[in-house]
Image (cartoon, rainbow, N blue to C red):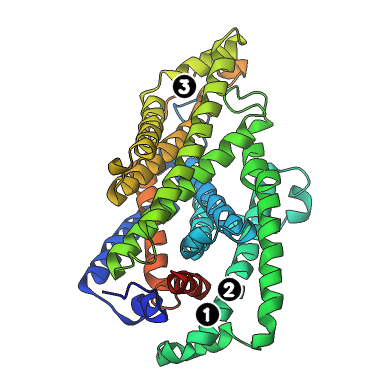
Amino acid sequence: MGTKTPSEADILRPVGTTSRTYFIMVAIAGLALLAFLVGWAYQLEEGLVVTGLGDWGSGGGVTWGVYIGAFIWWVGIAHGGIILSAAVRLLGMDRYMPVARLAELLTISGLSAAGFYIIVHLGRPDRMVTSVIGHYHITVHASPLVWDVTVITAYFVLTATYLSLTLRYDVSRLREQLPDRLDPLYRMMTIGYTETEDRIVDRMVWWLALAIIIMAPLLLHGGVIPWLFAVLPNYPTWFGGVQGPQFLTIALTSAISGVIILAFSFRHAYDWDHIFTDDIFRGLLLWLGFFCLLFLWLQLQQNITGLFKAPVALTHAAVARATNPIYLTSMALVFVTLAYIFAQAIRPTLFTKRRAVISGLAVLTATILEKVLFVVEGFLHPTFDIYSAVPGVYIPSLIEIASILGTIGMVCLFFLTIAKLVPVVELHAIEHLRDEHERE
């Protein structure tokens, strides 16, 4: 057990200790990723025909399905994660400082999973070079898909810079307690470091956080990502100005849910009850409830405009969405989660950390279901007359379902690995908590 006053030894425990449970988790996550890689290898050999994807509107297929839905889901988790971290730094929300780095790491891993989906969905990985990079100077002017690749790459670089700057401070001060076998890595991370740069780095991190807060609603999950769909008038369930705020609220609900699950996992594994306190979980649950409320409100706006005296094509698509069991399940999960959060806010005895984790899992399940259905429904109910007689059917294949489990396994492996290299809780957070304990 760690002491009740947080210390450097606490945040270094994952780096220096390895349990049997750790290897079991690595094995489970590795098997999930391996299963998908085997399926992807089969897809590379046989073509995308082995998935549930097919020629749009004919032969019963859609050209985008689970792959693009899960891509949006991971991008949302990533963008929401870095927004959470940036808000902590920019707004002085020191209460949540212990989970800030988890949110940053969630952004890096989420963007990696999203980028992987782009490669998988291209059918052949070489198309990333021949179709995207090779003709970038042409496609960037006309293709929202290339805008998408551009902003994700820019956000990845921005987040990696943001994270590396804070890691330099920690590694330089904890170097004597970190394992010698990783000395080359630590030397590379702290090249040219001197304590005089700390003030400059703090200022740089603040400006980076400000840039992230501004970019997220304008260019990222409130802008370019929804523009992939919202600017296309022939797809009734996609077109419209609601998609920007809708995507942004889903991103924040998903990211907060992910941080809750990660914080609980590390707290349980390394006895960090004095670092990830109940107060943090209560606060995260309240924020989750706020964004769940916005999520449901925006869904209501979308349903009302689609069902009340709308054009025939929009009404048809809206009815199909509103009566789909997958959609109803998604909305029910978010509503039940919101009801629990509201109830435990009124009656605190209802709060438990396990219920907070269940709430996070429910929201993540709801958002992946909603995003996949959102993508698929757009293709199944277009306003093109040429496809009116062949509305199409889409059933995800095992390979596509395995891709979700595989990328979750990939993200889990990322956290299991990174926890053995650097502290997943900032030294600044420990110093702040220790100061609070001393004042008490």
| Marks 1,2: beta carbons within 8 A | yes
Q: Is residue 285 above or below residue 176?
A: above
Q: Quadrant of the N terminus?
A: bottom left
Q: Earlier in the sequence, mark 1 or mark 3?
A: 1
Q: Is residue 232 above or below residue 33?
A: above
Q: CA distance from mark 2 to mark 3?
A: 44 Å
The disc labelled 1 sits on which kind of residue?
A: Asp
The residue most toward the top is 309
Report the front residue among 119 and 131.
Answer: 119
Q: Earlier in the sequence, mark 2 or mark 3?
A: 2
The disc labelled 3 sits on which kind of residue?
A: Arg
- List x then y, in percent, for residue 123: 51, 50
Q: For mark 1, does the 10 Å Cα neighbourhood hold few (<14), some (14 to 19), or many (20 or more) residues? A: some
Q: Is residue 236 above or below residue 55?
A: above
- Secondary element type, mark 2: helix
Q: CA distance from mark 1 to mark 3?
A: 49 Å
Report the front residue among 183 and 359.
Answer: 359
- Secondary element type, mark 3: helix
Residue bearing the label numbered 2? 166
Point 55% across, 89% down: residue: 187
Point 49% across, 19% down: residue: 391
- List x then y, in percent, for residue 185: 51, 85
Residue bearing the label numbered 3? 321
